[in-house]
Image (spheres, rainbow, N blue to C red):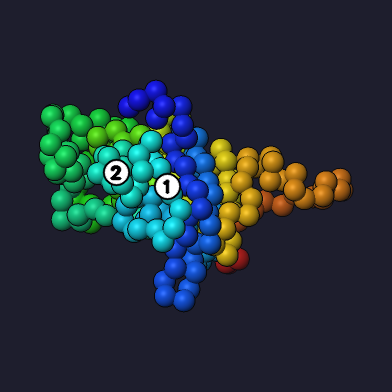
Amino acid sequence: MTVDQIQEPAIRVQGLEKSYKELRVLRGVDLDVARGGVFALLGSNGAGKTTVVKILSTLLRADAGTARVNGFDVAEQAADVRESISLTGQFAAVDEILTGRENLVLVARLRHLEHPGKIADDLLARFSLTEAGTRRVSTYSGGMRRRLDIAMSLIGDPPVIFLDEPTTGLDPQARIEVWQAVRELADRGTTVLLTTQYLDEAEHLADRIAILHQGRIIVNGTLAELKRLLPPAKVEYVEKQPTLEDVFLALVGDDGKNGHDRNVGTNA
């Protein structure tokens, strides 16, 4: 990588447009994503988040505008872009017949990497899947499958990872497992572009947040900067009640094993 590539953002999008017949999905998207950390792209269903990711990952060609990933033009240098990224979609792309370790070894071999077994073992340990590594993936929970999916996407150490709504359909406990994995990626210096429609997910994970609405980025900043767009909050005394998430985690425990059995609304 050249000095210029290192200095420029991990992702730079300028004037991106995309239409499907009469439907204009992207109407001039401008976006810079700095290297390292988590950048969350928010938007409701149909806002164009997945379309942006597909263009950036060279799966779709834009009608207009330019996009660069890791210093490479997505239209003119698609092969270099693909070597720089990994894409994890909304559904885990794992082989349920194989074990977790076999899935990782398979991907390492397909990438022609040396010592695929060691790569697999290191990733299993990194994502707390060592004990489950010899089990078939068909026995995994949703959170475990998603963590394995993310682990597979890291084989080859890509500097940029796209996570397209990675916690869709997961239960609260599995979502927290995935959040921990994503945060660890960013802490190790990987650039993560996360698309989500869960506001709490972006609030918990993202260093910067952009909102895509009607084909355009309408706001882009840190959580603190976005909060300053609203009038100052009035200070009032309100008795804080536990959230449903607080109740859920108190009952089942963070790992699903440390909770306490309780009967609610039943006669002993």
Q: Position of residue 182 (x, y in %)?
A: 43, 40
Residue 234: image location, x then y, percent? 86, 48
Q: Looking at the picture, does residue 23 appear above or below residue 42? A: below
x and y percentages locating residue 78 in the rendered image: 28, 46
Query: Image quadrant of residue 117?
Result: top left
Count of marks overlaid on the render: 2
- Distance between the Cα atoms at labels 1 and 2? 11 Å
Q: Which residue sits at x=36%, y=43%?
A: 73
Amino acid found under the numbered disc labelled 1: Ala
Furthest-top residue in view?
A: 3
126 is higher (above) or lower (below) than 138 = above
Nearest the camera: 224 or 236? 224
Q: Nearer the viewer, residue 77 or 53?
A: 77
Which residue is denoted by mark 2 in the rendering?
Answer: 77
Residue drawn at the location 63% of the way across and 40% of the way down = 222
- At a point 48% along the width and 73% down the height, the residue shown is 23
| Viewer-proximal residue among 259 and 242 | 242
Left or right of 58: which side holds 51? Answer: right
Q: Earlier in the sequence, mark 1 or mark 2?
A: 1
State the SS at label 2: loop
Q: Position of residue 94 (x, y in %)?
A: 24, 53
Q: Secondary structure at mark 1?
A: strand
Residue 122 appears in the picture as rendered: yes
- On the image, numbered disc 1 is attached to which residue? 67
Quadrant of the rendering where the C terminus is positioned: bottom right
Q: Amino acid at mark 2?
A: Gln
